């Protein structure tokens, strides 16, 4: 039995015809850490706010711990939330910020003092209890916000992009801290982020949303290796999966996909995993290859499928060389609106990206043979975007 | 290589005078700006200085020594005579006092400034407390609560900003004059209430003087609403999730966060109430606040004889001193809150 149950949750804002969240159904288990992720405007924060009760639910239902919560006021849902900008009370000290929900709940002063101390200990805030939030660093404020939420031992813990105001180093640190605290306390948590790295590293399960519609809810590993559609394939993973238009052929039982001038044979094991692929012979489909499944052929002779490309840009990161290649066929758009914002709709910006070993001798402008791990190819129907 | 060097040198030659000209221009502009500010400052402060200079002068000497920037025949007795209630003096003390008044060229009116100052303090305090309390609540409602017709109602409130106060003077006066509490309300005897026995309505009462401004002014609501809108919604939502209802959120979260603008509003309201003349002059003839008392003092000077400028300026200076002291002590907070509003 699920602990938090979203049943066809729909939100239509006044004055809008398009739903911000459209029929979101999801069952979350007790103690589970679920991350909502998606591009800007996908409805992830709206969905979270509906669970919190800060937005009314236009249609659908919400259950928490077997209790109907659809029309229950936020105060009575026994949930706590951490906001993007921390939302601390600036005129109260750290201790008073944390104690505030308990004070409202009528908890005795002695118990409040005890719980503030124990929560501050977990969050390493003991020495800051008398300070005002304005005198704390971003990371400390973040911990105070968490403390204020955790001190009540709520049924559900909600977090709305809590790390987005922190610098990169602190974000990585707090990411692990939040995951550790959640594991220690075992509180059911829904976490919203637009950062897929956060989503993949923190979540037991990741829920990908686009245009208010659930795309896939799965473990991070499954999302990466087995995306349900082109959007998830393009959204999850950095650099994103390369998607090409390709035609399917079947020559004497040997199925292959043709990417421009390159022919890539499809192994039997892959065919077994995609039994409907032979039905697409003669049709154009979308073929996906992750950048980490493409190798400098000189260093990975075990992969027989080869394509030729010309490096147009090299990014040497020390541990790898991110290589942008022109292979004579233009990659497809994964319909990630954030990516369109980045490229400004410039199709030429979509080069094929491969992650080569740092030992590669790849040079910009010099054509190179690229080998592909064909066991890890992905196939999608162009019309529906769904996995074949 | 030589080409590059030449072009670099040319670029340097072109940019150097431009930089010099620009920095020279900034210096000149800055001097002009400071000069202009200085002129404005002198123009603003000179009347205050002149009032002080007159207050510290012998009233006879100021007529004959008009060109002197310093107080002619310097004396501090004017302050003593304005602050002294002559009715508390014995006849001998009073005669002696009157003689000293004549020596500084003043008239023998018993000014007794303490009574109008106390009246002004009471009226201004009541208005300030009432206005800040009620306006902050209505501003919060306009900024945060969702109800039908909110924007239309707010526009109606704002439109009152456009109505000149003089338009409301006579209606307000009639209203206050006719305001009488029955001594019986639902058969409960209210005769013990201080204002219940009033037969002339609320004119010349503290309640009457405070009434038009006690509940709200459109400016105060508009001013606070803008601040409340600027306060992060998430903080209030956090309070909702912490279990706080509307009242708790307003008094424990929103009000403390808006302390600076509320403080500013209180100061502005207090100063306005202190300086107001027309309403207390019209509705409080028998309960003089300081502005009305100053007018009376001026009017009491016989037209044919020499006006008591020293006495009047001393009283004026004393009347303005509390406000000047308030600004000297708290002006920084006002500026801070206005800067805060600019950022938001």
Image: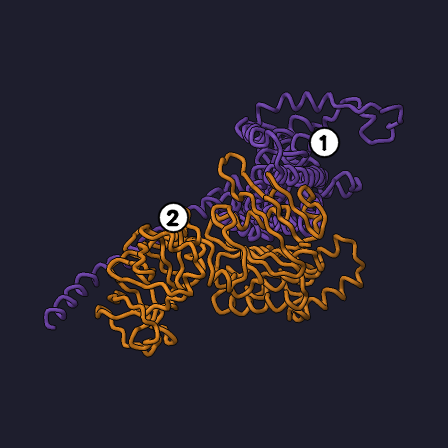
Chain colours: A orange, B purple
Foreground of the two, B195 or A152: A152
Placement of A387 over or under A140, stated as above or below: above
Quadrant of residue A147 within the rendered picture: bottom right
Chain letter, disc 2 residue: B
Label 1 in the same subunit as label 2: yes
Circle number at residue B36: 2
Q: Residue furthest left?
A: B2
Locate the N terminus of chain A by quadrant.
bottom right
Chain letter, disc 1 residue: B
Q: Is residue B188 shown left or right of residue A335?
A: right
- Tell me the element at label 1: loop
Q: Is residue B164 shown left or right of residue B43?
A: right
Would residue B80 be visible to someone looking at this image? no
- What percent of the width, then of the height, locates residue B136? 64, 41
Question: Which residue lies under the disc numbered 1?
Answer: B287
Q: CA distance from mark 1 to mark 2?
A: 43 Å
Rendered residue at 69%/33% (across/down): B210
Q: Residue furthest front?
A: A252
């Amino acid at each position: 039995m699920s602990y938090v149950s979203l049943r066809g949750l729909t939100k239509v804002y006044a004055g809008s015809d398009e739903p911000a969240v459209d029929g979101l159904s999801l069952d979350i288990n007790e103690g589970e850490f679920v991350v909502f992720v998606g591009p800007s405007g996908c409805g992830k924060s709206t969905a979270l706010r509906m669970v919190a009760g800060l937005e009314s639910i236009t249609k659908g239902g919400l259950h928490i711990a077997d209790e109907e919560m659809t029309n229950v006021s936020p105060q009575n849902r026994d949930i706590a939330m951490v906001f993007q900008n921390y939302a601390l009370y600036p005129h109260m000290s750290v201790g008073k910020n944390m104690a505030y929900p308990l004070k409202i709940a009528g908890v005795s002063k002695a118990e409040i003092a005890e719980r503030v101390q124990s929560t501050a200990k977990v969050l390493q805030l003991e020495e800051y209890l008398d300070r005002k939030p304005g005198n704390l660093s971003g990371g400390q404020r973040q911990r105070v916000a968490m403390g204020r939420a955790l001190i009540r031992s709520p049924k559900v813990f909600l977090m709305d992009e809590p790390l987005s105001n922190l610098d990169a180093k602190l974000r990585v640190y707090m990411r692990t801290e939040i995951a550790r605290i959640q594991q220690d306390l075992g509180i059911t948590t829904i976490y919203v982020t637009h950062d897929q790295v956060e989503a993949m590293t923190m979540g037991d399960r990741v829920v990908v949303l686009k245009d208010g519609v659930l795309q896939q809810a799965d473990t991070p590993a499954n999302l990466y290796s087995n995306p349900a559609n082109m959007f998830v394939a393009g959204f999850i993973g950095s650099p994103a999966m390369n998607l090409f238009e390709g035609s399917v052929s079947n020559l004497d039982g040997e199925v292959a996909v043709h990417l421009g001038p390159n022919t890539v044979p499809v192994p039997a094991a892959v065919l077994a995993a995609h039994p409907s692929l032979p039905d697409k012979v003669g049709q154009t489909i979308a073929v996906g290859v992750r950048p980490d499944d493409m190798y400098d052929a000189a260093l990975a002779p075990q992969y027989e499928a080869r394509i030729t490309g010309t490096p147009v840009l090299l990014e040497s990161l020390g541990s790898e060389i991110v290589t942008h290649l022109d292979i004579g066929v233009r990659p497809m758009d994964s319909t990630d609106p954030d990516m369109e914002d980045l490229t400004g709709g410039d199709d030429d910006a979509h080069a094929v990206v491969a992650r080569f070993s740092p030992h590669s001798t790849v040079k910009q402008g010099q054509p190179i043979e690229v080998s592909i791990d064909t066991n890890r190819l992905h196939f999608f129907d162009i019309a529906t975007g769904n996995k074949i | 290589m030589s080409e590059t060097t030449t072009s670099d040198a040319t670029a340097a030659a072109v940019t150097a005078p431009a930089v010099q000209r620009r920095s020279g221009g900034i210096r000149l502009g800055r001097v002009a700006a400071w000069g202009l500010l200085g002129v404005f400052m002198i123009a603003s402060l000179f009347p205050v200085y002149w009032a002080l200079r007159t207050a510290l002068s012998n009233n006879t000497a100021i007529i004959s020594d008009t060109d002197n920037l310093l107080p002619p025949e310097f004396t501090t007795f004017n302050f003593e005579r304005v602050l002294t209630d002559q009715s508390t003096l014995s006849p001998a003390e009073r005669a002696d006092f009157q003689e000293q008044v004549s020596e500084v060229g003043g008239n023998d009116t018993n000014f007794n400034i303490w009574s109008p100052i106390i009246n002004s303090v009471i009226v201004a305090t009541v208005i300030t407390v009432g206005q800040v309390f009620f306006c902050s609540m209505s501003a919060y409602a306009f900024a945060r609560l969702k109800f039908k017709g909110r924007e239309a109602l707010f526009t109606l409130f704002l439109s009152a900003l456009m109505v000149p106060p003089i338009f409301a003077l006579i209606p307000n006066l009639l209203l206050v004059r006719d305001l009488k509490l029955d001594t019986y309300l639902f058969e409960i005897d209210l005769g013990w209430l201080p204002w219940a026995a009033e037969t002339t309505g609320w004119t010349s009462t503290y309640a009457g003087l405070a009434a038009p401004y006690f509940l709200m002014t459109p400016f105060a609501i508009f001013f606070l609403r803008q601040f409340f809108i600027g306060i992060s919604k998430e903080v209030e939502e956090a309070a909702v999730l912490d279990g706080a209802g509307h009242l708790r959120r307003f008094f424990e979260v929103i009000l403390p966060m808006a302390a600076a603008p509320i403080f500013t509003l209180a100061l502005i309201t207090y100063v306005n109430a202190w300086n107001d003349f027309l309403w207390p002059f019209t509705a409080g003839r028998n309960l003089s606040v300081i502005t009305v008392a100053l007018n009376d003092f001026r009017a009491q000077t016989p037209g044919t004889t020499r006006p008591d400028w020293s006495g009047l300026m001393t009283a004026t200076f004393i009347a303005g001193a509390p406000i000047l002291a308030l600004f000297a002590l708290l002006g920084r907070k006002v500026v801070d809150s206005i800067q805060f509003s600019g950022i938001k």
